[in-house]
Amino acid sequence: MAPKVYGVDLSFPVRGVLLTAKAIDLDIEFVPVNLLAGEHLTPEFKKMNPQHTVPTLDDDGFYLWDSHAIATYLVSKYAKNDSLYPKDLKKRAVVDRLLHFDSGIVFPRARGAFFPILFLNEKTIPEEKKAAIYEAYDFLESFFDGNSWIAGNELTVADLCIIPAVTTLGGIFPIEKSKYPKLLAWIEKCKTLPYFAECNNPGNDGLVAKLKELLSS
């Protein structure tokens, strides 16, 4: 039975898991969850995931949440090799560091900027939140010194988990080529992955369009 991933493609973390599954050629069953209708708050969903977050994985009765935990689990169990999540301790530590950077810097800053627009009827993003996003871009730019991918010279789950948020952020907070050439080059490189458009673009484009609509209303 194919693993099930519960989520909504507007979510950056959900898109990271979808990208990872495609990267390892894993067939999954994607189960859409209507958050606005409270489908994540049903007793059935909360039995799987008491935090009632997406993505949530059901792998034959093994329930797991947090996109980074899911991505590394899927690679460790189903991938044909360890290139996406190396067994070499030093290489893996770099990937883990970047996954923590995503969960500690990129995701909370993106959520902090967008949540009030989407759910609290705010019409502007405060300057300090914009500055925090651009500081995250500064950090990301520095990570590509000597690297073709974010954790080295091979694609890893760090790329696949971070790129969805960055593409959405870039739709609202422009990434200037003169200031962030390496970051933009990485984004373009990610776009060449054969499964990238399928897994990222619908959710990314829908979220960016919704944010722009709300910010201009």
Image: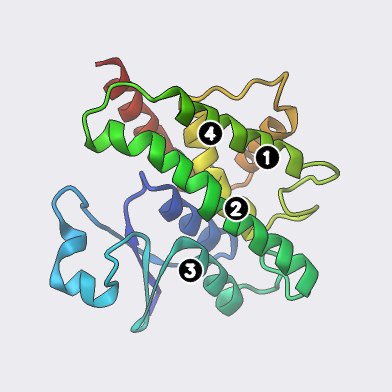
* Label 3, label 2: how far apart the Cα atoms are: 16 Å
Name which residue lies at 48% across and 59% down.
Answer: 17
Mark closer to the chain start, 2 or 1:
2
Residue denoted by label 3 = 70
Which quarter of the rendering shows the C terminus? top left
Q: Identify the image quadrant of residue 58.
A: bottom left
Label tally: 4
**Secondary structure beneath disc 3?**
helix
Residue denoted by label 1 = 139
**Secondary structure beneath disc 1?**
helix
Q: Residues within 10 Å of mark 3 (few under 14, many from 20)?
A: many
**Secondary structure beneath disc 2?**
helix
Q: Amino acid at mark 3?
A: Ile
Residue denoted by label 4 = 132
Q: Amino acid at mark 2?
A: Phe
Name which residue lies at 53% across and 72% down.
Answer: 74
